[in-house]
Image (cartoon, rainbow, N blue to C red):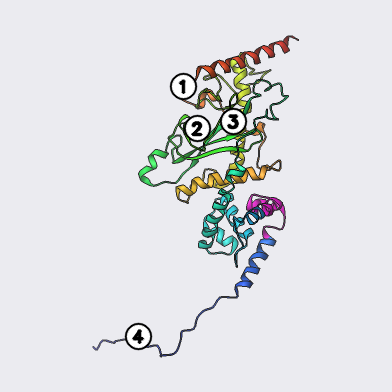
Amino acid sequence: MMAMIIEPRKRKRGVRREVITCGPMDERDRMRLEYLNSKIWEDDTTCVNMLRLNRDKFFRFCNLFRDRGLLQDTIHVCVEQQVAMFLNTVGHDLKDILVGTNFDRFGETVSLYFNKVLHAVGELRGELIRPPSLDTPSKIAGNPRWDPYFKDCIGAIGGTHLRASVSKDIEHTFCGRKSYPTQNVMAAVDFDLRFTYVLAGWEGTARDALVLRDALERENGIRVPQDKFYLVDAGHGAKPGFLSPFHGVRCHLNERGSNSVQNEKELFNFRHSSLHITVERAFGALKRRFKILDDATPFFPFPTQVDIVLACCIIHNWVIQDGGDEFITEDSNLPSYNHATTYVGKANEHAKMVNFRQGIADQMWADRQNININ
């Protein structure tokens, strides 16, 4: 039997293959903007659900980038769409392909503008993450629970562990407090819930005291003005400029009634905790707004994961500078934790701050006893 030989059909010279063309880009752009106007920017509820900001704050945020020259409108993607894609990503922990579906864009386009907006937000760091005021915080001034005992306190320092994605060869150094890799993020927060310093990127195995030491040693690190101090947890220990609770003493009690404080150390820890929980509220608001930080497995390179943490803190500060925010929970709605049981081991403490702490505790207890007598 003779084999059949099939030759490829030769293309006639001078005849071009028909090209499949797309619709006019201006029409596609019009449809994209129409979608945003009807599905996202139609009302505040939808805008917050999609972008984690209401319409007024969103458009003012976009104008900030445009006015500073940090972002520019392109032929087919305006600044509002660039920022919206970024916020949709970090607000809901969505991958490029899903955000692209939401905004009728290719995943590559989403990735391109995500990095542009991430860089633009980072440029606002010096303006929006600033050292705290040296005046007595309004939350403390005139409040007999904390004034005059904490009148020189300028904020609270705490940390949180955020899930990290790193290469297998270094993964073990990031598996510390959690069974999965995390980065240890340290932040200082004032009593208006603004982040005044953020240090991200440390391995999950790093102890809190080590991260704080690094923050102090950096050229642009955290600084404590003379005669001022931050509240810290037991893991940091009492050091000049940093006031921790008494180790091994209960914190979450009541001043009166059932489960009330029994001595000066318990009273100090109770009031210290009621102020220090400010940093927990700030981290809580951050994670509620940006689901990419809320126990999600990151899909970005680790350096980008670190930059995202900082960017989220910058946006948080920008949002709350005008007042309240729907993502902030009141003190009473936060879960309690006990400094005496959440930290294993005892940090080295400086004698000066130990004596300072004891003096505050003694004064608190004496004032409380006088009130009870009178």
**Residue topped by disc 3:** 156
Asked whether the residues under the numbered discs 1 and 2 touch, taking CB atoms below 8 Å apart as contact, a structural biologist would say no
**In the rendered structure, which segment of residues is drawn in magenta?**
39-61
Spatial CA span between label 4 and label 1: 82 Å
Q: Position of residue 58 (x, y in %)?
A: 67, 52
If you read the primary sequence from the N terminus, does the residue marked by circle 2 or circle 4 appear first? Answer: 4
**Residue topped by disc 4:** 8
Q: Position of residue 141 (x, y in %)?
A: 71, 26
Amino acid at circle 3: Ala
Say which mark, if any, is on residue 216.
Answer: 2
Mark 1: secondary structure? loop
Using residue 210 as the reference point, say whether residue 289 is left or right of it: right
Q: On the image, which quarter does residue 360 sit in?
A: top right
Q: Is residue 138 magenta?
A: no
Say which mark, if any, is on residue 348.
Answer: 1
Mark 4: secondary structure? loop
Is 6 rendered above or below residue 361?
Answer: below
**Which of the two discs, 1 and 2, sits closer to the camera?**
2
Q: Residue at point 67% right, 57% down?
A: 40
Q: Is residue 52 magenta?
A: yes
